[in-house]
Image (cartoon, grey):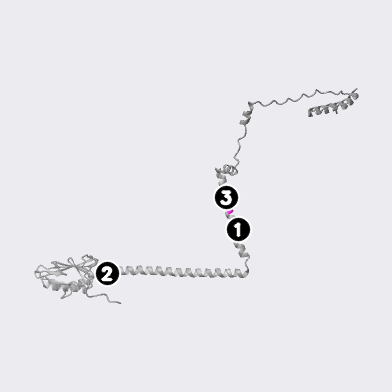
């Protein structure tokens, strides 16, 4: 019975319309089952037609239109600028960029140095010898210039020291000449000679003799009362009595302040028939006091020379 039905079904298959994939699958499954001996073929239910899609209503069109994508700007430059600006650089990216820059700079320097050395490697022996000779000559010139500069520096230092020494010596000499000229104060060991003349018997010539005796004994600076004694000092007698020194009236007691060696000045005044004995013969009394430090502070006003001029060397 099953064998008769099977050819009939197979004969009807070409006339039937092509079924959906699901039907073919079910038919294949049914055929497999029919091949099984002792089993009856089962005829599956016919497939239901697929529902037709419903038309979209008018109310749904605005919503679909509202969901349309917003068109992006078509300008490529604008899109590129929007992608790279404003820059978004992190700290790590900045560190990496700096390291890469340093690495590139080091590589460039290394390549340049290698190129320089490669030029020397490719040079001929004659060129290398010439380069060495040029370097030796340049080194010798630099060494010669260094030696000359060192010699110039030493000469400048010596001349500077000599100039300073000469300046110092000039200053000292000017101070000494100022003491002799009476334009500078003087201090040092010396004596103080005081002449008391209650009778008024001491005249200008006696004071001049005393001055000459002190100068002969090595006096370096002399002051009588408040008058500084210099090379051009002169003594005169007043008509009314008394003595004038450089036009200034000086009254007794006459006080000589002398800078010099006290051991030379004192004996020079006390020699027999000297200044002290002459003053005593005129009823005047002379007193000598030796001191380790005396001050001659009276200053003389220098007078310009009318006729004398320094002689040319």
> At x 42% / y 69%, what residue is drawn?
154
Q: Position of residue 49 (x, y in %)?
A: 76, 24
Q: CB under 8 Å between callouts 1 and 2?
A: no
State the CA–CA distance, disc 3 to disc 1. Answer: 18 Å
Residue 263 lies, with reference to residue 13, above or below; the image says below
Dot 1: element: helix
* Left or right relative to 221: residue 47: right
Residue 161 visible? The answer is yes
Q: Nearer the viewer, residue 67 or 270?
A: 67
Contact flag, marks 3 and 2 (Cβ < 8 Å): no
Q: Which residue does the numbered mark 3 point to in the structure image? A: 99
Residue 276 is situated, as x and y percent measured from the top left of the image, at: 15, 72
Dot 1 alpha-carbon crowd within 10 angstroms: few under 14, some 14 to 19, many 20 or more: few
Tag in front: 1 or 2 = 1
Q: Is residue 260 visible?
A: no
**In the drawing, does residue 152 fall left or right of residue 112?**
left
Q: Give the spatial CA distance, label 1 vs label 2.
A: 77 Å
Q: Please give the residue where the numbered disc 2 appears in the rendered image.
A: 176
Pick whichever of labels 3 and 2 is earlier in the sequence: 3
Question: On the picture, is 265 further left or further right than 149?
Answer: left
Q: Nearer the viewer, residue 229 or 192?
A: 229
Residue that numbered label 1 is attached to: 111
As for residue 29 lying within the magenta part, the answer is no
Q: Nearer the viewer, mark 3 or mark 2?
A: 3
Would you identify the image quadrant in which residue 270 lies? Answer: bottom left
Task: Tell me the chief SS of the magenta region.
Answer: helix
Q: Residue at 60% of width from left, 58% of height from top? A: 111
């Amino acid at each position: 019975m099953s064998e008769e039905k099977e050819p009939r079904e197979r004969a009807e298959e070409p006339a039937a319309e092509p079924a959906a994939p699901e039907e073919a699958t079910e038919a294949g499954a049914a055929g497999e089952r029919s091949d099984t001996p002792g089993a009856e073929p089962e005829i599956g239910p016919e497939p239901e037609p697929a529902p037709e899609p419903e038309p979209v209503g008018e109310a749904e069109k605005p919503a679909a239109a509202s969901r349309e994508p917003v068109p992006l700007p078509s300008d490529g430059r604008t899109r590129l600028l929007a992608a790279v600006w404003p820059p978004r650089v992190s700290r790590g990216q900045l560190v990496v960029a700096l390291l890469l820059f340093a690495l590139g700079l080091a590589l460039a320097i290394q390549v340049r140095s290698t190129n320089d050395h490669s030029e020397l490697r490719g040079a001929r022996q004659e060129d290398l010898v010439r380069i060495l000779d040029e370097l030796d000559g340049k080194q010798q010139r630099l060494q010669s210039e260094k030696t000359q500069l060192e010699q110039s520096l030493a000469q400048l230092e010596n001349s500077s020291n000599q100039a300073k020494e000469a300046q110092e010596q000039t200053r000292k000499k000017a101070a000494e000449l100022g003491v002799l000229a009476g334009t500078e104060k003087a201090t040092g060991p010396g004596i103080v000679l005081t002449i008391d003349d209650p009778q008024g018997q001491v005249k200008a010539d006696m004071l001049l003799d005393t001055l000459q005796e002190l100068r002969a004994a090595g006096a370096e600076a002399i002051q009588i009362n408040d008058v500084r004694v210099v090379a051009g000092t002169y003594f005169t007698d007043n008509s009314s009595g008394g003595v004038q020194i450089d036009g200034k009236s000086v009254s007794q007691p006459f006080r000589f302040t002398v800078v010099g060696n006290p051991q030379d000045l004192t004996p020079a005044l006390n020699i027999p028939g000297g200044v002290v004995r002459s003053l005593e013969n005129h009823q005047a009394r002379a007193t000598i006091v030796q001191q380790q430090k005396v001050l001659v502070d009276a200053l003389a006003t220098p007078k310009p020379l009318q006729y004398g001029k320094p002689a040319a060397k």
